[in-house]
């Protein structure tokens, strides 16, 4: 019985070691840009129109989702954020800045918090659209942010969080 267990553990270890060695030998870096760039004026203009249309539909869809969710749902989802952020009025900064009154405020302006250079340079006001994009994938929305959260893929979850964050403010925005 011992020989069988040792053989299985050895086989698994051998497969893992071979996998790691093969990854090191055959490692290739991903290119930032495609090696072949084909520029077509018709496709470029249609791509920009399509991109603008998709951005507008995303903005409309997040606004439409406010009717199907609530700030109570956002409070439940916010528990993911509570490990790094406080949202209570007068709440202190944690790993991340305090989020009381975030919507409508300029990014990177919470006192006594050391923001990343990317967030300070971003310097836009947190609108619904900005917050939605940031919550989707923070590192893509604000280049250079030190926020390590992967993001919320579900647009209904993002809408609920935005409603909850808007509710936790001295001056809530009109969202409906």
Image (cartoon, helix red, strand yellow):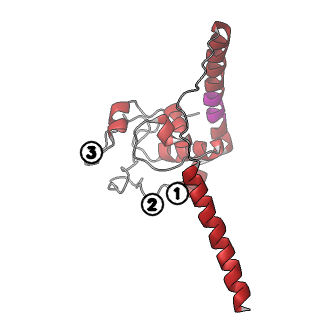
For image coordinates 38% across by 32% down, the residue present is 122
Residue 59 located within the stretch drawn in magenta:
yes
Q: In the rendered view, would you say 105 is above or below 87?
A: above
For mark 3, what is the residue? 111
Residues under labels 2 and 3: Cα distance? 20 Å
For mark 1, what is the residue? 80
User: Which badge, 1 or 3, comes first in the chain's sequence?
Assistant: 1
Question: Which residue is at the front of the view, 118 or 127?
Answer: 118
For mark 2, what is the residue? 83
Q: In the rendered view, would you say 77 is above or below 126?
A: below
Question: Which residue is at the front of the view, 143 or 111?
Answer: 143
Q: Which residues are magenta?
A: 58-64
Q: Dot 2, crowdedness within 10 Å: few (<14), some or many (≥20)?
A: few
Residue 135 located within the stretch drawn in magenta:
no
Give the structural element (helix, strand or loop) at label 1: helix
Q: Is residue 43 visible?
A: yes
Q: Are marks 1 and 3 in contact (CB under 8 Å)?
A: no
Q: Is residue 174 visible?
A: no
């Amino acid at each position: 019985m011992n020989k069988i267990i040792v053989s299985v553990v050895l086989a698994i270890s051998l497969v893992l070691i071979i996998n790691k060695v093969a990854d090191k030998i055959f490692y290739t870096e991903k290119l930032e840009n495609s090696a072949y760039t084909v520029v077509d004026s018709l496709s470029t203009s249609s791509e920009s129109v399509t991109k603008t249309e998709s951005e507008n539909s995303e903005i409309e869809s997040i606004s439409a989702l406010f009717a199907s969710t609530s700030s109570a749902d956002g409070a439940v989802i916010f528990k993911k954020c509570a490990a790094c952020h406080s949202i209570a009025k007068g709440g202190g900064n944690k790993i991340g800045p305090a989020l009381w009154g975030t919507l409508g405020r300029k990014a990177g302006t919470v006192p006594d918090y050391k923001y990343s250079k990317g967030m300070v340079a971003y310097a836009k006001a947190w609108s619904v659209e900005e917050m939605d994009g940031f919550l989707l994938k923070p590192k893509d929305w604000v280049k250079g942010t030190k926020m390590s959260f992967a993001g919320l893929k579900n647009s209904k979850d993002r809408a609920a969080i935005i409603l909850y964050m808007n509710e936790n403010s001295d001056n809530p925005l009109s969202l409906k």
